[in-house]
Image (cartoon, rainbow, N blue to C red):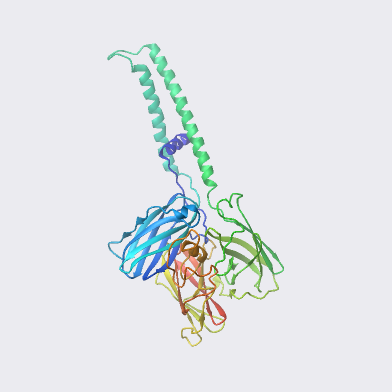
Amino acid sequence: MKLASTFILWLLLCLVAAPSAAHAHVGSKDVFETVNTGPYKLYVTIRTPTVIPGVATVEVRSSGANISSIHITPLPITGEASKHPPTSDPMARSAADPAFFTGSLWMMASGSWEVRFQISGEAGEQTVSVPVPAVALGTLKMQRGLGAVLGILGLFLVVSMAGIVAAAVRDARLKPGAVPSPDRRRRAVMATAGSLVFMSLLVWGGATWWNAEAASYSLDVYQPLRVDPVLSDNVLDLNVRAFHPDSERRGRSNSDFLPDHGHLMHLYAIREPEMDAVFHLHPELAGPGDFRILLPAMPAGDYTLYGDVVHASGFPETLVSKVVVPENMAGGRPGPDDAVAYPQPLSKGRLGDSYKLPDGYVMVWDRPSTLTANTGYSFRFRLLDGSGKPAADMQPYMGMAGHAAFVKTDGTVFAHTHPEGSAAMAALMLANGGEGGGHATGHEGMSMDMPMDMSEHAEPVSSTVEFPYGFPSAGPYRIFVQMKHGTTIETGAFDALVQ
């Protein structure tokens, strides 16, 4: 039955697959982005495929000037193929909501892609691109019921074909009404046996071919770069190396990182299981694949490390590892962009909508009335001074109005996002005017001729910041939000229960 079902699969050229891992971010594969291009503002959600080639679903909600049409095009961010985009596809406008558009695109190869949006409306035409990391995330064995049905159908085809061969040998040359001779019957039996042997060899060959293709495909299933943390005194070395010797050919080296917001790595260290100590740190590259940092004073315990990096192709990765901080570890001086917070332990109950900060400031979350998985939101946070007024001395934090990390309490989801969205800024720069990039006029607060490190923010910084994001699964989450006033980096913490 197994061989027969495999033969049918071969004929149908069908592959069934499902996710088992995540790439840029952890457990959060979809892209949420707020795009400002000319007078148009787009809230973009791109639901990436879990197998490659695969279909990505694109959703756009527009505001600002009226839009008459949006065309979308998938293409690699870098390389020769980025110079030869395919024909664009029109997005469908919702009949119930003229500001909502949907579409779908084929992602034909693993790597760092962009979706280019060509917008037409009352204010003219604009073009902007959103980077999309596309990788095969896993495979899934065929369902038992489907395999049984295909096996029965395959067996029926084999038996039917043998019957056709037997009838042809036995009866093809007989005159109407004649009875086959014993010799014809013997030859029919021999032909039936031969045809069964022949078709069994075909099925075996198909199964062998299928297994070889499946093994080859499994090599393309995404595996993140491996991180080996070594803590000596308070010096943390993060040794990054390829999980597979073929990783560099696939565009993911341990020595091709781009600066993102002025740093090659953004490292979140979160104490488990209570999530009552969180550090946003920035190791420096001490050698090929070797990130190093002098840790600040940290309470002892087990920490999960989430290190965000961006490759030269624009492909982002979150590298996950763990480290144990011993008692009485001497602490170094935090870097100018490092942030620290000590929220109450998870076991003390959920944090609310208002978080009091050590210097008397308060961070407030304008929490949506309901939180549902796989739904895009714009999460809004406000920083108030000690008198309850909006903070007046706001400063950019690493070139942005704020940074946020959405972390599921069991560690299966981690996403480091910005006011523009979940895409890495270095990838946005490449997609919008960098090497092999598109032709965008800009994201909010971003100019296409700005340096890759994004160390400066051209626009005044508000005491209110919004982050587009959607929780990928139900369950409890803790959200860490960083904003800066004066020389102080504040980290607010909030808990969310997602339905």
Tell me what residue is drawn at x 51 percent, y 45 percent: 217
Drawn side of residue 94 relative to residue 367, left or right: left
Quarter occupied by the C terminus: bottom left
- Looking at the picture, tell me which residue is in the foreground, 107 or 481: 107
Residue 479 shows in this picture: no
Q: Position of residue 227 (x, y in %)?
A: 63, 59
Tell me what residue is drawn at x 34 percent, y 17 percent: 171
Q: Position of residue 460 (x, y in %)?
A: 47, 79
Q: Quadrant of residue 237?
A: bottom right
Residue 41 shows in this picture: yes
Drawn side of residue 19 relative to residue 339, left or right: left
Q: Is residue 257 above or below residue 467?
A: above
Tell me what residue is drawn at x 41 percent, y 62 percent: 45
- Looking at the picture, tell me which residue is in the foreground, 479 or 123: 123
Q: Quadrant of residue 93?
A: bottom left
Q: Position of residue 318 (x, y in %)?
A: 55, 61
Q: Is residue 12 above or below residue 413?
A: above
